[in-house]
Amino acid sequence: MAGVKLIVTYPTPKDVAAFERVYQDEHVPMAVTKLSGKTKVVATKVHGSPQGKAAFYRIAEIHFPSLEALQACAASAGGKETPRIPPRSPAAARRSC
C-alpha cells in the first residue's frame, strides 16, 4: 500500500502573532516528538488564493508509510495527546496541557 497522510487545516487566527508563537514553539515540536511512525511533516502557510482570500491560514501534512501506521499513531499516547492542543491561542494551549 502507498503512503498516506493526515491533513490538518487551520483557519485564519484573530491574533496571527500569538498563533504563530504557540504553533512554532509548542504545537510543531510536540507533533514532531510525539507522533510516532510518521515519515515527514510538512507545514505550509497559505498566503493567498486565485479566488481571493484563502480558506485556510495554515495546512499541516503528516505523512505515514501506511494507513496502519497512521492508525497506530492515532491510538498511541502521543497520538491522542497531540490533537488536544489546537494552536488557536496561547491561553487555549495552556488549558489543554
Image: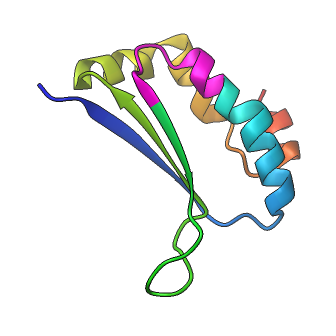
Residue 62 location in percent, x, y? Answer: 44, 34
The residue most toward the bottom is: 52
Residue 63 location in percent, x, y? Answer: 37, 31
Which sits in the foreground, 56 or 92?
56
Residue 77 location in percent, x, y? Answer: 55, 12
Q: Residue at x 44, y 87 (%)?
A: 51
In-image side of 78 versus 49 (left or right): right
**Residue bounds of the magenta highlight:** 30-40
Q: Residue at x 25, y 18 (%)?
A: 68
In-image side of 26 versus 40 (left or right): right
Height in image: 90 above or below 73?
Answer: below
Q: Residue at x 39, y 22 (%)?
A: 39
Quadrant of the snapshot with the C terminus: top right
In-image side of 7 versus 15 (left or right): left
Height in image: 96 above or below 79?
Answer: below
Q: Residue at x 42, y 21 (%)?
A: 38
**Quadrant in the picture for residue 53:** bottom right
**Which colouring convention does the figure follow?**
rainbow
The question of residue 44 being in magenta is answered with no
The question of residue 36 being in magenta is answered with yes
In-image side of 14 versus 57 (left or right): right
Which sits in the foreground, 86 or 62?
62
